Amino acid sequence: MKNINLETPLMSTILVSVLSLFFIIACDKGSNADQTKLETDATINSQKQNPADSIDVCSLLSKSEVEQVAGKPVLEPESEQMANLFTCTYGDPEYPGVTIVVGLSVFIASNSADATEILETARKNAASVEAVGNLGEDAFWDKIIRTLWIVNGKYEIGIEAASDAGGFDTARKLAVKVLERLP
């Protein structure tokens, strides 16, 4: 797997969300430094991946499906992973390594409450939010970073779609496919 490119808006937002969750968990435990360290270590250890908490995120959307829905060609999908965060990007062949046509992220939380908390953190950090119905348990569109955020059970899903690839409409159509294919 490749190193994570934190320069994309999707990856930056996801990283902020994940770090915020860890910060909330750590701060919520009290001020005893030793106890907090033990509990933080336990949280990190409990979130270490096991086979049941792994996903081949690029298998959720084929290259041809993305091209068909986005209405433009894309590069072969590239996957990345950091702890329980799995991403797949479909780059623009005109600007390889620079522009993403569609980006998909799936964070596997310990439970649905944690996934919902991550979604709420992303919503609070978003500058311009539009509520979205009939997708998962909760969803919203971040108009600035062109990302559709969805929570469904223990999964927090982000689908970024470039404006010239259909933006929200593309993200929503792809989200339906992703939700059908999640384990």
Image (cartoon, rainbow, N blue to C red):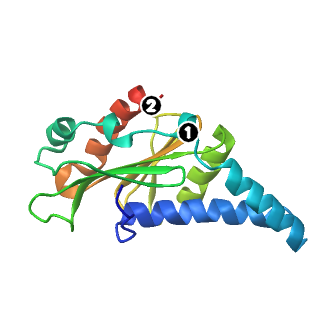
Q: Residues within 10 Å of mark 1 (few under 14, many from 20)?
A: some
Please indicate, yes or no, whether residue 118 appears anywhere in the rendered image: yes
Q: Residue at x 18, y 44 (%)?
A: 70
User: Residue 41: where, in percent of width, then height?
Assistant: 75, 60
**Which badge, 1 or 2, comes first in the chain's sequence?**
1
Please indicate, yes or no, whether residue 125 appears anywhere in the rendered image: no
Q: In terms of depth relative to the viewer, which is nearer, 41 or 23?
A: 41
Q: Compared to 67, does 80 lie above or below? A: below
SS at mark 2?
loop
Q: In terms of depth relative to the viewer, which is nearer, 149 or 47?
A: 47
Q: Mark 1 sits on what residue?
A: 53
Q: Which residue is drawn at 13% across and 65% down?
A: 95
Q: Mark 2 sits on what residue?
A: 182
SS at mark 1?
helix
The span from disc 1 to disc 2 (Cα, nearest Å) is 12 Å
Q: Compared to 33, does 148 lie above or below? A: above
Q: In this view, does 64 lie to the left or right of 105?
A: left
What numbered label is drawn on residue 64? none
Q: Compared to 6, does 103 lie above or below? A: above
Q: Is residue 166 left or right of residue 108?
A: left
Q: In which quarter of the image is residue 146?
A: bottom left
